[in-house]
Every structure is written in structure tokens, then in C-alpha cells.
């Protein structure tokens, strides 16, 4: 029995390395990588400081209206100022290349937007009439195509700068109307130009001059952001962009006609749309 026990122990000792060698080894986890295509969604808020459109007359009557129509007490037309602001949301897609601690990429995004402004300014003329001017500007949608260059302080944390092309649809509207105690048709012609606005309570009372524009503006954008790799394929991002759309546009604000005169008109223009954008989102990296 003693000899048998000794033999079994020897076999066990000799066999242990072989058994350990035959056991499968668990592969070490792969290091995180930012290289690959990605797709994601985002939402944010955009704003601009106070601004107002500029008005330029097209005829002698409009000149008198803007400067201070004598028939309306000599008060100039007030142009309201307001702040463009609101929310937006959409999707982005792109591709990253990681080289050591540097990440280079291209990204494009498209956003639906409720960024808008509307304002009204009124002035009492002292002739029984109040002139009311209302303006409205809205960014319906916008999109960007940008390059990104980033640095990895850690393997899971990216800090980057970005810049490129921007485009968006901007809708604008201006209305000038009159209210007060006068009845019947207000306004007479000057040098063959004129406008009409009937008394309050009738369909034309609140809208004597009216004009609108819808344009697709293009420009540029630049900003910075940060992104965290929360799993091997999912990232969370926060980003700031400054976006400048176009050099502005002007459109005609034309009067309702009055018999025997040419409808008066003036031009309205907001200039370029400068907008600050802050947004948060996530991406899924296909790697």
C-alpha cells in the first residue's frame, strides 16, 4: 500500500504541468479604440443677442413713413429688437482615425430647429393712430459638415476642436399696421405712391404693409467639444459651436394698394445670422 500511494503521488506531481498547460487561457481585453464609423443623436439650445432688421425705403411715400409721416403725427416707424433663441435636435454621423493619442475625423449633422424671434413695437402718433410694427425670424433647420482634431488625455476621454461648413433655412416676416380711433381709409399718396389701411375691426386694419422671405443661407461654423467612451462602442458628447449663416438677405415689404396710387414698399434685412449652439448627444462606434 505504501508503494502504491507513493506511485500515485509521483504521477500526480508529474501530470500537473501538463494539465495546466492544456487549460485554455482567457485572452486579455482589447484596448479601447476610437477608429471607425459612428452614428448618433443630439439635442441642444441655440441663441443670439438682441438684433433688429434694417429698413430701407423704395419710394418717397415709404421714406416719409419710416422718417415720420406728417399725416400720422410725424412719429418715425419703430423697429423692434429681439433675441433669437430656442431648441433643436437631430442626428450626426462620421468617421474617426486614431493614431496613438490623436484622433482625426470628419462629421456631418442635420438638425430640426425651433430657434426663433418675434417682437412688436408700437408708437402713438398723437393723431389718433398707433403704428404697430412686428418682426419674426426663424431658423427652420440647419446642418454642418466639419473636420475634427482631438487629443486623448486618457484612452476613454477625447477633447477636440472642430470647424467647417454650415447651412440652414431662415424664414423672415415683417408687418406694419395701424390701430386707433380713425375710421375709413387712412393714408394718401405722395408723388404717386400710397398705401391703405382701413379702420380697426375690418380685415385690413392690422396689416397695411406686409412682406416675407424664406432663404437657404450658407456659412461656416467652429467650436470645441469633449466625448467619453462609456463602453467599447458607445460615447457621450458635449459640444459648443459658433455658427454664422450667410451675409443676410433683403425682401420687399409692400403696402396694400390704394386707388390711383402705386403701392408703396420698403426693404427689410436682418443681415447675417450669428448663433451660439450648445448640444449634448451620444454616438455608437462600429469597430
Image: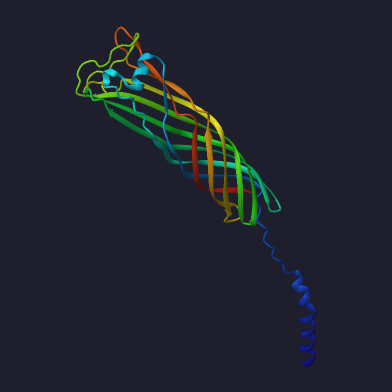
- The residue closer to the viewer here, 180 or 98, is 180
State the quadrant of the N terminus.
bottom right
Eyeballing the image, is 194 above or below 5? above
Tell me how the rendering is colored: rainbow
Eyeballing the image, is 2 above or below 81? below
The residue that appears at 50% across and 42% down in the rendered structure is 277
**Which image quarter: residue 191?**
top left
Residue 287 appearing in the image: no
Residue extending furthest toward the bottom: 2
Horizontal arrangement in the rendering, residue 38 relative to residue 88 (left or right): right
- The residue closer to the viewer here, 184 or 171, is 184
**Which image quarter: residue 197?**
top left
Horizontal arrangement in the rendering, residue 214 relative to residue 32 (left or right): left
Residue 251 appears at what percent x and percent y?
Answer: 44, 21
Eyeballing the image, is 273 above or below 250? below
The residue that appears at 67% across and 58% down in the rendered structure is 31
The residue that appears at 31% across and 19% down in the rendered structure is 69
Horizontal arrangement in the rendering, residue 259 relative to residue 171 (left or right): left
Horizontal arrangement in the rendering, residue 142 relative to residue 5 (left or right): left
Q: How many marks?
A: 0
Residue 26 appearing in the image: yes
Residue 275 appears at what percent x and percent y?
Answer: 49, 38
The residue that appears at 35% across and 22% down in the rendered structure is 67
- The residue closer to the viewer here, 197 or 230, is 197
Residue 28 appears at what percent x and percent y?
Answer: 69, 63
Residue 13 appears at what percent x and percent y?
Answer: 78, 81
Eyeballing the image, is 168 above or below 237? above
Amino acid at each position: 500500500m505504501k508503494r502504491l500511494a507513493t506511485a500515485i503521488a509521483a504521477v500526480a506531481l508529474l501530470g500537473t504541468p501538463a494539465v495546466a498547460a492544456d487549460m485554455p487561457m482567457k485572452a486579455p481585453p482589447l484596448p479601447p479604440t476610437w477608429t471607425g464609423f459612428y452614428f448618433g443623436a443630439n439635442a441642444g439650445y441655440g441663441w443670439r443677442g438682441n438684433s433688429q432688421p434694417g429698413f430701407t425705403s423704395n419710394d418717397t411715400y415709404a421714406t416719409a413713413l419710416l422718417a415720420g409721416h406728417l399725416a400720422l403725427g410725424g412719429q418715425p416707424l419703430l423697429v423692434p429688437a429681439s433675441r433669437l433663441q430656442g431648441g433643436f435636435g437631430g442626428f450626426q454621423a462620421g468617421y474617426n482615425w486614431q493614431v496613438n493619442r490623436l484622433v482625426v475625423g470628419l462629421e456631418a449633422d442635420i438638425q430640426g430647429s425651433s430657434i426663433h424671434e418675434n417682437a412688436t413695437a408700437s408708437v402713438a402718433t398723437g393723431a389718433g393712430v398707433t403704428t404697430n410694427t412686428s418682426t419674426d425670424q426663424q431658423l427652420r433647420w440647419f446642418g454642418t459638415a466639419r473636420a475634427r482634431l482631438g487629443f486623448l488625455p486618457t484612452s476613454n476621454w477625447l477633447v477636440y476642436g472642430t470647424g467647417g461648413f454650415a447651412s440652414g433655412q431662415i424664414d423672415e416676416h415683417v408687418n406694419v399696421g395701424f390701430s386707433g380711433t380713425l375710421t375709413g381709409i387712412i393714408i394718401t399718396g405722395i408723388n404717386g405712391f400710397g398705401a391703405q389701411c382701413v379702420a380697426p375691426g375690418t380685415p385690413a386694419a392690422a396689416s397695411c404693409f406686409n412682406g416675407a422671405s424664406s432663404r437657404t443661407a450658407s456659412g461656416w461654423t467652429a467650436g470645441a467639444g469633449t466625448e467619453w467612451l462609456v463602453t467599447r462602442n458607445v460615447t457621450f458628447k458635449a459640444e459648443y459651436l459658433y455658427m454664422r449663416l450667410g451675409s443676410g438677405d433683403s425682401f420687399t415689404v409692400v403696402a396694400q394698394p390704394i386707388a390711383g396710387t402705386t403701392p408703396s414698399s420698403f426693404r427689410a434685412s436682418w443681415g447675417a445670422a450669428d448663433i451660439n449652439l450648445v448640444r449634448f448627444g451620444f454616438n455608437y462606434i462600429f469597430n
